[in-house]
Amino acid sequence: MAALRRRIQRHAGATRDGLLPAQPEALLAALYRHRGLGEGAVNQPLELAGLLPPADLKGIDAAVELVIDAITQGRRILVVGDFDADGATSCAVAVTGLRLLGATEVGYLVPNRFEFGYGLTPEIVAIAARSAPHLLITVDNGISSMAGVLQAQAAGIRVLITDHHLPGAELPPADAIVNPNQPGCRFASKALAGVGVIFYLLLAVRGRLRDEGWFGAGVQAPNLAELLDLVALGTVADVVPLDGNNRILVEQGLRRIRAGRARPGIQALLEVSGRPSDSVVSSDLGFAVGPRLNAAGRMDDMTLGIECLLAPDPARARQLAQLLDRFNQSRRETESLMHEEALLELEQQGELAAEALPVGLALYRPGWHQGVIGILASRLKERYHRPVIIFAQGGEGELKGSARSIPGLHIRDLLDAMATAQPDLIRRFGGHAMAAGLSIADGDYSRFATLFDQTARQWIAPEVLEGIVLSDGILPVAALTLEVARQLRYGGPWGQHFPEPLFEGEFELLQRRIVGGHHLKMLLASAEGGEPLDAIAFRFDLDQLEQLPNRLRLAYRLDLNRYRGETRLQLVVEHWEAT
């Protein structure tokens, strides 16, 4: 919660006075309209029958042929994953799904972030070749792995790429590529996460095997909906847009989890996160389960996360989930220290005020942890509302950077422009509109930081740097109830590009106190009357504490606060302004 260069602005579809209906169904209908859904969307169930067909994916037929040949001939398949939550869930979906479909020789390999970096590199291919796979399937990576694909094929290994990242000017010469973002693909949803792509491939393989009579001769046609808890987790954790197709995938996965049908690994991760599985929503996956899974790849080796997701029994899953929870605590401590050091660095440079900051903000300290730089970039991007790139040592005279952007600036395209302007500056880069990764030479940091700021100033209009807090409008006092909060909680799934409802209102600050070191607990009275309301602002900037006036205009979410067996209404404050 911060007042720095932000202002509340209502959705274009809000009424002139901004007042929303108090009745839950009418309220949800208004919120859906703000997010681009038409009349009746509230009553349209998010069922699997509404999914886009796999046949629309370019390359799906060739990919299916490769997989079916490997399954029916008993050939060895090796899945090459990635070291984030999308990569881990993609790997678990691929391994589990292929086995369900009858594959007898399936293994996986995931690069260690600190030894090999991202993607299907020649070094990873060399390791993969030791197990002599017939078919290598990438999940959540591979679309830019030119050298790795060539090396695999030279070793006699067939390569199937499944990915969702934006391709470069040239595609790798794989035997088949399935990626909704490759040129010429007519699949309507370009927002599939990597886990969604491999799930779609498995659906297509099952359909073809069924048509060819594979099932029934000792092999049962599997229910691939069993994989949807993994698909939901990976989709939410990768923060891809929740378009209509992704909302179906996520909602169906959440329903399975709430019904007690989650696999042991996800159930264990929910337990160590303190999130009851029978009431789980997308934010629980995004803010509790996803970070613990990601912590394996950030602090150690994502193999541990994948093994947790693949664990067949609750005892083993719980053991691994507890280990991931400890990794996550270590990640938090490292992130907190790096955040303090970043703010100190900016203060020493005299740039702590937003007006003095570079438009494109790059920071580097030699001791920063490579696995946490993406989180730090996100924190600073949220605080200062500008594109941020954080660098850490990558070994062998190289710095690795993680970039996060703001709406209105496509960070991968900006990096491409920088690479065109100075071809010797960026060694490697890739990503999408809001996030990217890159590598530069250790000695080029200052030159990079200068060019990044200069290019960002050319690309970003000044008004884009003013953060907009997009409000759905004003909730009447009659809607500030537990019942409405419950309806909103399960009215999603909410997420990227389909954001959780955010409301505005004027309140009197009755009480305040700091809890947990940096969260602000408040007792508020609505300007419209009614009972006092509990509220909390997470990660409150303590420097602003004395600036808080007695009367506030707030942007907030309605939430349920469960504590010691009691559930109470709570406002989660995202932004404040003086009235």
Image (cartoon, grey):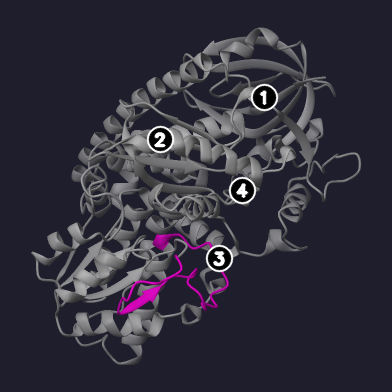
Q: Secondary structure at mark 2?
A: helix
Callout in the foreground (2, 4): 2
Sequence order check, earlier mark of 2 and 4 = 4
> Residue 410 placed where, x, y %?
58, 52
Q: Which residue is mark 3?
A: 245
Distance, label 2 to label 4, CA atoms, is 22 Å
Residue nearest the observer in this picture, 72 or 476? 72
- The answer to whether residue 189 is magenta is yes
Q: Which residue is mark 4?
A: 409
> Residue 143 placed where, x, y %?
38, 66
**Residue drawn at (42%, 51%) of the image:** 233
Distance, label 2 to label 1, CA atoms, is 23 Å
**Residue drawn at (58%, 44%) of the image:** 455
Q: Which residue is mark 2?
A: 445
Q: Which residue is mark 1?
A: 355
> Residue 60 placed where, x, y %?
40, 80
Direction from residue 401 to residue 559 in the image, left or right: right
Q: Which residues are magenta?
A: 168-195
Disc count in the image? Answer: 4
- Badge 2 amino acid: Tyr
